[in-house]
Amino acid sequence: QVQLVESGGGLVQAGGSLRLSCVASGRTFRNYAMGWFRQAPGKEREFVAAISWSGGTTSYVNFVKGRFTISRDNAKNTVYLQMNSLQPEDTAIYYCAAAGTVVSVPTLDRRYNYWGQGTQVTVSS
């Protein structure tokens, strides 16, 4: 089992920044690729970003490229999502997830085994 706890969400004005954190406990963190997903009201959950177990490979959905950065610190069992230039359409609950898979940077939610409880991000216009 891997337990994931997100933090760092909140209310921010358009153009602002937030950094989300996700701390893992349980099994060896570095064995897992990590991802961030989000779900806006009335919409399906969607992929945002993923990072390989080593941190050497990342993947982003197009609409966050250049604005969001995923990173990880295996010594701290933590994955981060730095979000800059936030827009109202980024408003959602953000979830981190852990994937025990051979895929380096999985983008499909079905490849993820463990999920956090989510943290709310609200961007006002």
Image (spheres, rainbow, N blue to C red):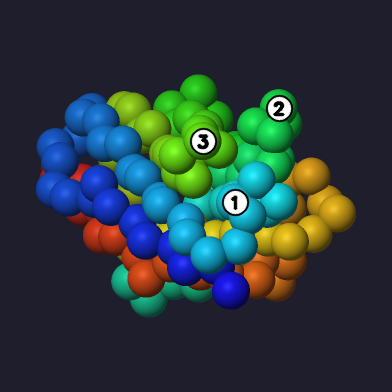
Please give the label number shown on residue 55: none
Q: Quadrant of the C terminus?
A: top left
Q: Amino acid at mark 1?
A: Phe
Q: Secondary structure at mark 3?
A: loop
Residue 80's image quarter?
top left
Q: Amino acid at mark 2?
A: Gly
State how far apart marks 1 and 3 are (Cα). 9 Å
Q: Amino acid at mark 3?
A: Ala
- Residue drawn where x is 58% and y is 74% of the image: 1
- Residue drawn where x is 45% and y is 32% of the image: 68
Q: Secondary structure at mark 1?
A: helix
* Percent x, y of residue 103: 83, 52
Q: Are marks 1 and 3 in contact (CB under 8 Å)?
A: no
State how far apart marks 3 and 2 are (Cα). 15 Å
Dot 1, crowdedness within 10 Å: few (<14), some or many (≥20)?
many
Dot 2, crowdedness within 10 Å: few (<14), some or many (≥20)?
few
* Percent x, y of residue 16: 21, 30
Q: Are marks 3 and 2 in contact (CB under 8 Å)?
A: no
> Mark 3 or mark 2, which is nearer to you?
3
* Percent x, y of residue 112: 66, 66
Relative to 112, is 51 above or below?
Answer: above
Please give the label number shown on residue 56: 2
Residue 57's image quarter?
top right
Query: Is residue 99 in sight in this rendering?
Result: yes
Instruction: Name the residue carrying label 1.
Output: 29
